Image: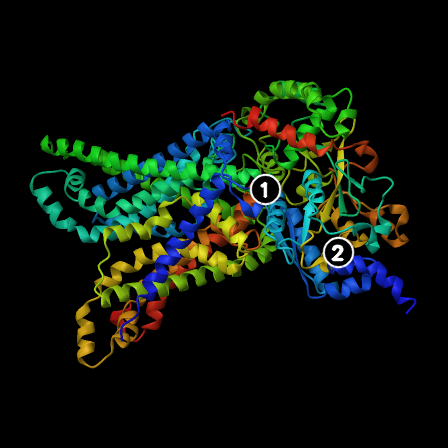
Amino acid sequence: MRLPPLLPTLTLLALLGPVLAGLWGTLRAAVGHLPELGMQGPSLAPVTALVEWPGLWAAVRLSLVTGGLATLSSLLIVTALIAGWNGTRPFRMMVRVLSPLLSVPHAAAAFGLLFLIQPSGWVIRALSPWLTGWERPPDLLLVQDPMGLALTLGLIVKEVPFLLLISLAALAQTQGAERMRIAAALGYGRSAGWLFSVFPALYSRIRLPVYVVLAYSMSVVDMALILGPSTPPTLSVQILRWMGDPDLTLRSLASAAALLQLTLVLMALLAWHGAEHLVARLSRRLITSGRRWQRDRWLRFGVVSLAMLCVTMVLFGLLGLTLWSFAAGWRFPEALPDALSPSSWIRHGPIALKTLGTTFAIALAATGLALVLTLGCLETEERRHLAVTERAMWLLYLPLLVPQTAFLPGLQTLLLGVGADRSLWAVVFAHLVFVLPYLRLSLEGPFKDWDARQGRIAAALGASPNRIFFCLRLPMLLGAILTAIALGVAVSIGQYLPTLLIGGGRVQTLTTEAVALAAGGDRRAIGVFALLQTAAALLPFALALWMPKAIWHNRKDMHHG
Amino acid sequence: MKRVLPLAFVLAPFAAWADPDPAHWSTVTATAQGQTVYWHAWGGSTATNDFIAWVGDRVEEDFGITLTHVKLESTSDAVNRVLAEKTSGQDDDGAVDLIWINGANFAAMKQADMLFGPYAEALPNWQFADTEGKTLQHDFTVPTEGFESPWAMAQVVFMYDTADLAAPLGSMPQILAWAKAHPGRFTYPQPPDFLGTTFLKQALVDLADDTTALAAPLREEEYAEITAPLWAFLDELTPLLWREGRAYPQTGPRQLQLMNDDEIDLAISFSPGEASTAIANFQLPESVRTFVLDKGTIGNASFVAIPYNSGSKEASMVVANFLMSPEAQLHAQDPDVLGYGTILDMTKLPVEDRAAFRTLDLGVATLSPEDLGPVQPEPHPSWMTRIAEDWVKRYGVAN
């Protein structure tokens, strides 16, 4: 029996349907056509209003600078780290510490960082008043700074683990060790040898994820609400503000701004692409210069300190939040609370637990759907010998490249028109758009690496293709599948904007609650929610590590999936 | 038949769209059983969230109503929602069953016929409401006409840390003079935040010689003249603010954290009991007290309203009525809970309820009703909207 091409079609529909529909809705609203709200277009009024908004230039500059700087810095750190340390013991340790950071939700990481670096934060507390002489927090713009540096820092600490893990996955396909041996034989230093011989091969494989980081960093909302400036905010935050204004004509203004956001991201991607060529040309010149760069200790130790700093900041941020959630009185400049008390957990715990249920229900539903679609696609492609082209990969990445603020407002308006928003299922399908690409990225490698000869042996013994798929291939891929599920759940738990906009306020998850609380600034409540959010995202990963061992306790060779 | 017929006439207009009638309270409570109320209320204050959760427990217990608090970032989200539903023709079982609402949002919804009612003055607990002494029938000068029911009294007070600021400041010019001597120690929530806008209104009212124009809708020809003292004041004050006015707390409660961190010494609040409650929750140091301005401060009632397309109007009315009950009012006034002022008239209450209110300890930082002084009326909502807009143009995009 042959599977119908139903699953690939459904997958494409689930991936692209919401994005395209949302963009269409945004475009319509941007030209002033919003029949659901009684506005008939087309008109240029929204665009004119956007141009006349006095904060436009600053908001645009913020999006470009924070997004560009965060992406560039993260990529440089990751590249230099792999170049200098790949294959060493410290590197393996580093990877082990950085990997869990991937699943720490952006909002939680941002809260932790906020408490660490603000003028009344932990770093200054630890140094005051004995070193700084400050009895009171200094009046400094360390967070919410107009340049968006705090926001950039927040993005870097989250994007470094992401790019590192993506790079490691891709590194396996680059024959890095062989290339390095040749470079070493020619007398190149470790970092330079890697950069010249392996990096080009690696970069072509991680190009799309880098673009994703750029698009995401330029349009992030939750982190920008917590760490970004407010006079004016980034363009994406301003879009959200306009979406929530009582004056409904501002919805069309928000949509015009969303189109601008999309244009900015596209331009930035083009510029980045152009810069790739430039870097390539410059590097060729460096390579032909003949220098060997054997002394690279400063680079190696510099970058490892930077990476350690990223880890430390996130970990200490989370530790600070933990302390706050148990703190009784805790004033500046005390480095530790006066006393510990469970009262914050007693106060906020029950509500948080209720939200935890919804959070997991959405995450599991979206991940379950995505898993069926992804495995179905992979199997269909294999049975029908369909090769996935580079262009198809772009389609897969599309929902991650189009800024959320560009298509979700339009999607919300469209769903509202047919009365289908604010249901749990609408939110699940909105999450599916973002879970699907990650599941595919996570499963594709292990699925294709499975030794097909085992299937042939099974077929020779009389097993049907379906039996081979369900009874042989899937069980052997258990570890990879569980890791993919954990990733999908983590992605879903971290979603802020889709839940907020599509859920219309009725669907509350740990993330929407935590960001809503952020406005109130109650660090104890934020601590409770951010910790639960982090735990919820980490738990599936722990389960994914433990479950293969438990399930295959009598099959030792299956313990690693 | 004779008895039924007039009743049928009375009910006829209601029957046309099958809306419940609060005059038949037993029918209302019976129908309310098992309904779910989505109460859209601002969710940025943990104290309020806890109070709403308590209300949910109580109405579940007594009436079998499920109350869900939809935590809004801004009340306008809920207004938007109802408006969008009305425009798209979703006239029953809308997303919103009950809204915590005030001022401009109420005026907009009432004008656009988006509210169910009148119901408020037919609720059983209305008999205890202090309609004489408190502004329960006007919301920002707009007559409520029973389309929203009150549940708390609010009045502007300033919270100050006595460890850093010795004596209360009696007027806006005095606040400015103090800020000059102590730059960086004062801020207010960033307009268009509700409390931030309230600070602007309070400054406007305090600085104006004559406030009569503020009671009527804004007229363009007077606007520049009346607001000139406000902008002059803000031009001087802004560089003296926390972070030199380059960043602002985004909401009222955010100021508590700043005060607790000793970043600021003075903050505005719209709830006379907020400081005491925050001290009890470790959110403020014990040295914080409150003051009002010499000429008095702005005050109003907080209301709840029911959208025209709510699918649980009965249960929403039961919740609105419960909010006005002596039990809920006493709980809300407890500084360990909310510390909100009551809307009830003590002389109308049964003896034991009155005694309970009298013995309630208002908390260290709460002014007594006498010390709260005269309540100034809110300006017409059109002033608030316009001033918030102009503030954003002048100071909100300055970086």
Which mark lies nearer to you, 1 or 2?
2
Establish if B296 lies above or below A21: above
Numbered disc 1: what chain? A
Q: Residue at x 53, y 48 (%)?
A: A514
Q: Position of residue A16 (x, y in %)?
A: 37, 53
Q: Would residue B137 be found to the left or right of residue A554 on screen?
A: right
Answer yes or no: is residue B249 visible: yes
Check the picture and name the quadrant holding the C terminus of chain A: bottom left
Q: Would residue A179 be found to the left or right of residue A142 on screen?
A: left
3D distance between C-alphas at marks 1 and 2: 29 Å
Residue position marked by numbered label 2 in the rendering: B317
Crowding at dot 2, Cα within 10 Å, few <14 / some 14-19 / many 20+, comes out as many
Question: Which residue is at the front of the view, A514 or B27?
Answer: B27
Q: Position of residue A181 (x, y in %)?
A: 10, 46
Answer yes or no: is residue A524 visible: no
Question: Which residue is at the front of the view, A46 or B57?
Answer: A46
Q: Position of residue A539 (x, y in %)?
A: 42, 59
Check the picture and name the quadrant holding the N terminus of chain A: bottom left
Looking at the rendered structure, the kind of residue marked 1 is Gly
Establish if A456 lies above or below A281: below
Q: Specify the farthest residue to the right.
A: B2
Q: Specify the farthest residue to the bottom.
A: A462
Q: Position of residue B118 (x, y in %)?
A: 78, 50
